[in-house]
Image (spheres, helix red, strand yellow):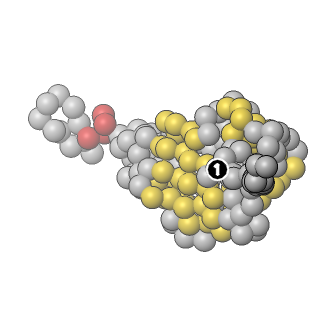
Amino acid sequence: MRLSLGIGLGLSDLQGSTGVIGTAPVINTYSPDDEDTGVAVGVNLVATFDQNIVFDVTGGDLLLRHSGTTVVETFTIASTTSATGDGGGTATISGNQLTINPGADQAVSTGHSFQIPATSIDSAVNGLSFAGITDDTTWNWTTAGSSTAGEPIGLLLVLTKAA
């Protein structure tokens, strides 16, 4: 059946092969940026999508990795807006932002990456799934060489009386 919209298009012309109007979510920006260096070890990770998103509670685990081989923390989806890390961290969704707060600081002077299975995040608008990040090169960064950047240092001041 073809429903005419009166503008030379039918409803079937606007639907994709899935019958759903719209597009799957994509990430517009990463923080830290992909390939960034000198990233603070305690930074939260933020992926900003082009539309509002939700976790798919039947999706796979999200992974924070370092050096391309070792899983640092696994985030298991608990609800449409939160996931819990096995290291005490959290991953939350608010609108179009996914924020990952690792349970511990990342290792210094180390390459890190974040992976998101294709079945883990869906559009809150049309239900289409994010394509995912399944490699260590799409979103990766290197932490700074010191975990003390910006922290206060001890200072001893000795005053003596002039003779």
| Residue that sits furthest to the front in the current view | 163
Q: Mark 1 points at which residue?
A: 43
Q: In this view, does 61 lie to the left or right of 19?
A: right
Residue 44 against residue 74 in the figure, above or below: above
**Residue at 36% in and 43% down:** 21
**Residue closer to the observer: 133 or 21:** 133
**Residue at 38% in and 52% down:** 125
| Residue that sits furthest to the left in the current view | 6
Mark 1, Cα crowd under 10 Å, few <14 / some 14-19 / many 20+, is: some
**Residue at 21% in and 31% down:** 9
Estimate the x, y position of residue 58 in percent, counting from the top left: 62, 65
Query: Can residue 77 be seen here?
Result: no
Q: Is residue 149 left or right of residue 8?
A: right
Helix, strand or loop under label 1: loop
**Residue closer to the observer: 124 or 8:** 124
Residue 129 against residue 138 in the figure, above or below: below
Estimate the x, y position of residue 133 in percent, counting from the top left: 67, 42
Asked where in the image residue 69 lies, by quadrant, the reply is top right
Residue 72 against residue 85 in the figure, above or below: above
Estimate the x, y position of residue 53 in percent, counting from the top left: 46, 53
Query: Can residue 73 be seen here?
Result: yes
Look at the image and tell me in which quarter the N terminus lies.
top left
The amino acid type of the residue labelled 1 equals: Val
- The number of callouts visible is 1
**Residue closer to the observer: 115 or 126:** 115
Estimate the x, y position of residue 147 in percent, counting from the top left: 77, 48
**Residue at 44% in and 50% down:** 96
Residue 157 against residue 16 in the figure, above or below: below
Q: Is residue 93 left or right of residue 44?
A: left
Q: In this view, does 79 lie to the left or right of 59?
A: left
